[in-house]
């Protein structure tokens, strides 16, 4: 079974500081994609960042970066210079095929002014 | 360019009633998906359609049917709603790279 685990139901960070959200996954596949999605109170799911498993280089999108450890099956999200608009639920997701997607249970991020 | 649209935004049903959730995308994507989101859980895939004319089961298909009406539209039907189907339903479509998904705004469904 494919599973994605986010062990931090809630996290908080001071504005302008850095926070890291954790995600682990279970798979027997060698090629797959990993994602972080943001869900603000509006409920809209927004893709934050994507990592291809065959790429060793960690993905980066502006203030968002990942630490991808393939052997450990770990995929953490680092948010630098946190802003009030970063407050949201963050979901880690895994896809082995591009059709089947598996999501974690989410981490609620609070940004403290 | 509306992206992915879903109707209705909210719906209340009685147990045993039926309804269809509508989804349309204007991005010319081949793949479309239906998810449900329950409190304390992430999104779970109900059904997906990799291309017009094909549909496949996801993780939680029981109690649902789908129709890929054309390339733009992918509907989800509840034939006999149950309280366990109370959830927020999201439709998504797959971009040029199928691994990238674009989500609709969701439908909040309550079954009493």
Image (cartoon, coloured by chain):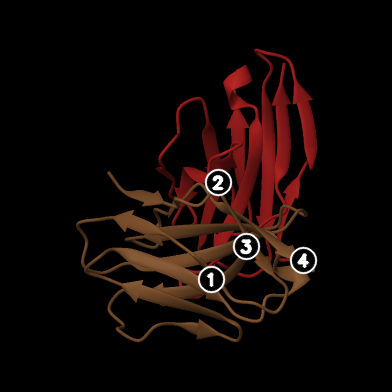
* Residue bearing the label numbered 4: B2
Q: Give the Cα distance between marks 4 and 3.
A: 20 Å
Q: Does label 4 lie on the same chain as label 1?
A: yes
* Residue bearing the label numbered 3: A38
Q: Does label 2 lie on the same chain as label 3?
A: no
Q: Give the Cα distance between marks 1 and 4.
A: 14 Å
Closer to the eye: label 1 or 3: 3
Chain to which mark 4 belongs: B
Q: Give the Cα distance between marks 3 and 2.
A: 18 Å
- The secondary element bearing badge 3 is classed as strand
Q: Is residue A62 above or below residue A103?
A: below
Q: Give the Cα distance between marks 1 and 3.
A: 18 Å
Q: Residue at x 48, y 59 (%)?
A: A92
Whether residues under marks 2 and 4 lie with C-beta atoms below 8 angstroms apart, the answer is: no
Q: Residues within 10 Å of mark 2 (few under 14, many from 20)?
A: many
* Residue bearing the label numbered 1: B95
* Residue bearing the label numbered 2: B34
Could you tell me which quadrant the N terminus of chain A lies in? top left
Q: Residues within 10 Å of mark 3 (few under 14, many from 20)?
A: many
Q: Is residue B105 above or below residue B29?
A: above
The hue in which chain B appears in the rendered picture of the protein: red
């Amino acid at each position: 079974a494919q599973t994605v685990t986010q062990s931090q139901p809630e996290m908080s960070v001071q504005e302008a500081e850095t926070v890291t959200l954790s995600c682990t996954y279970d798979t027997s596949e060698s090629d797959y994609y990993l994602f972080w999605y943001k869900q603000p109170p509006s409920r809209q799911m927004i893709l934050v960042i994507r990592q291809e498993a065959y790429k060793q280089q960690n993905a980066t999108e502006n203030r968002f970066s990942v630490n991808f450890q393939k052997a450990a099956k770990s995929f953490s999200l680092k948010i630098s210079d946190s802003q009030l608009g970063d407050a949201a639920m963050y979901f880690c997701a895994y896809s082995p095929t591009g059709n089947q997607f598996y999501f974690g249970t989410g981490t609620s991020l609070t940004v403290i002014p | 360019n509306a992206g992915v649209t879903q109707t209705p935004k909210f719906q209340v049903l009685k147990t045993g009633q039926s309804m269809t959730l509508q989804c349309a995308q204007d991005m010319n994507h081949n793949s479309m998906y239906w998810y449900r989101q329950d409190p304390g859980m992430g999104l779970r895939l109900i059904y997906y359609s990799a291309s017009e004319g094909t549909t496949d089961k996801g993780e939680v298909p029981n109690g649902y049917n789908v129709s890929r009406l054309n390339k733009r539209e992918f509907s989800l039907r509840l034939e006999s709603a149950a309280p366990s189907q109370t959830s927020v339903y999201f439709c998504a479509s797959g971009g040029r790279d199928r691994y990238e998904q674009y989500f609709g705004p969701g439908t909040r469904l309550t079954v009493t």
